[in-house]
Image: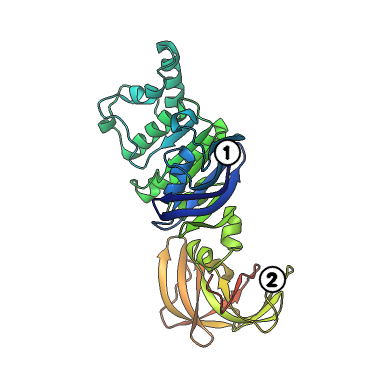
């Protein structure tokens, strides 16, 4: 449904996006994540037709809509957009906001579509309210319904949950994913919050310095990050010093870890091994001990930062009924299934 081929976007002489390629099948949801200034919003605007591309191609359902020599106007792309500030009309009712883009339909068709969408987004009976009478989450649902009303072939969402509190962001992201799946709509969302991306996306692209660092499933990004930036940006983790014994095993202060698939690293290479908090299990019976440096209560879990070996640090996510004092030594049992190793000389 959507394909980007080596896209570059520039403002005058300054390139903000370069060499970005990815594709989405019909009904799939993709998310672009990254820090501020990474180019993700500029890329979304290029897909929408709000920005020209300096090079590359954007194809929508097999149709070329943007290249360096041609550009289909945004209003002819059949793309719905949910903006960061919702861009709702305060002087119109909820129903009038939703029906705003349906001027080619008669009144009866408009009313039927509005009723259908109000029910779909969970706002049944609220069509006569004005925007200021709604909560932030309800306003977001109105913005979604308005974008869906013309039945777009692609939906774009630009930081759609940024103005909402954390709990509401999480639940709304899941609700919107359910709605899009019901309708079979392909969507691309921009966010700086990886938790929103995990809640929404089939595919996630990590952006940095205008480039797509990795495009993959949430599982791939977490367990098989392509470089140090992705490893650091996605999830939480520590880098532990190690030495490759061969291409598929590494020696560390916590022991030797192996995997069936060989890495591209050779024996003797000094590496940093990515260790996630869920790779370190709390085990009172284990002879391997670690010193508690700090702890953070996370409800069902306690996140411990531990000192191991010669001053190296790892994190451990333990059930919260395991209460240990700072400075105490506790038993740990590493279970590292995926060897994510970066050569010490690497700066990628």
Residue nearest the observer in this picture, 338 or 333: 338
Nearer the observer: mark 1 or 2; the answer is 1
Question: Which residue is painted at 42% across and 26% down in the image?
Answer: 118
- In the image, residue 96 sits, relative to residue 338, either above or below, namely above
Q: Secondary structure at mark 2?
A: loop
Relative to residue 309, is residue 117 depicted above or below? Answer: above
341 relative position to 235: left or right: right
Residue designated by label 1: 59
Label 1: state its secondary structure.
strand
Q: Quadrant of residue 142?
A: top left
Image quadrant where one finds the C terminus: bottom right
Instruction: Look at mark 2 in the image and give the residue it sits on.
Output: 263
Q: Is residue 159 left or right of residue 228?
A: left
Report the front residue among 66 and 99: 66
Write the residue at 55% across / 83% down.
Answer: 289
Spatial separation of the CA atoms under disc 1 and disc 2: 35 Å
Image quadrant where one finds the N terminus: top right
* Numbered label attached to residue 101: none
Outermost right residue: 260
- The image quadrant of residue 122 is top left
Mark before the other along the chain sequence, 1 or 2: 1
For the image, the number of numbered tags is: 2
């Amino acid at each position: 449904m959507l394909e980007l081929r080596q896209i570059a976007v520039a403002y005058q002489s300054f390139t903000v996006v370069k060499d970005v390629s990815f594709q989405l099948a019909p009904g799939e949801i993709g998310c672009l994540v990254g820090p501020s200034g990474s180019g993700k919003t500029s890329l979304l605007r290029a897909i929408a037709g709000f920005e020209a591309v300096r090079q590359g191609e954007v194809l929508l359902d097999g149709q070329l809509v943007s290249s360096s020599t041609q550009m289909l106007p945004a209003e002819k792309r059949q793309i719905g957009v949910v903006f960061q500030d919702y861009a709702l009309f305060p002087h119109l009712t909820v129903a009038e906001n939703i029906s705003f883009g349906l001027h080619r339909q008669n009144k009866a068709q408009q009313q039927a579509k509005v009723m259908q969408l109000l029910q779909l987004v969970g706002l049944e009976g609220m069509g006569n309210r004005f925007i200021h009478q709604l909560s932030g989450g309800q306003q977001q649902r109105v913005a979604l319904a308005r974008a869906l009303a013309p039945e777009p072939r692609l939906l774009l969402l630009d930081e759609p949950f940024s103005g909402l509190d954390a709990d509401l962001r999480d639940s709304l992201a899941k609700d919107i994913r359910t709605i899009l799946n019901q309708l079979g709509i392909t969507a691309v969302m921009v966010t700086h919050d990886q938790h929103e991306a995990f809640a929404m996306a089939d595919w996630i692209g990590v952006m940095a310095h205008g480039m797509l660092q990795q495009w993959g499933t949430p599982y791939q990004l977490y367990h098989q990050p392509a470089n140090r930036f992705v490893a650091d940006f996605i999830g939480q983790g520590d880098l532990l010093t190690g030495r490759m014994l061969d291409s598929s095993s590494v020696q560390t202060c916590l022991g030797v870890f192996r995997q069936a698939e060989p890495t591209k690293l050779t024996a003797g290479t000094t590496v940093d091994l990515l260790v996630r908090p869920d790779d370190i299990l709390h085990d009172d019976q284990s002879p391997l001990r670690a010193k508690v440096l700090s702890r953070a209560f996370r409800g069902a879990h306690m996140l411990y930062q531990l000192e191991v070996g010669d001053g190296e640090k790892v994190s451990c996510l333990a059930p919260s009924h395991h209460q240990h004092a700072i400075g105490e030594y506790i038993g740990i049992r590493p279970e590292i299934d995926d060897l994510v190793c970066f050569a010490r000389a690497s700066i990628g």
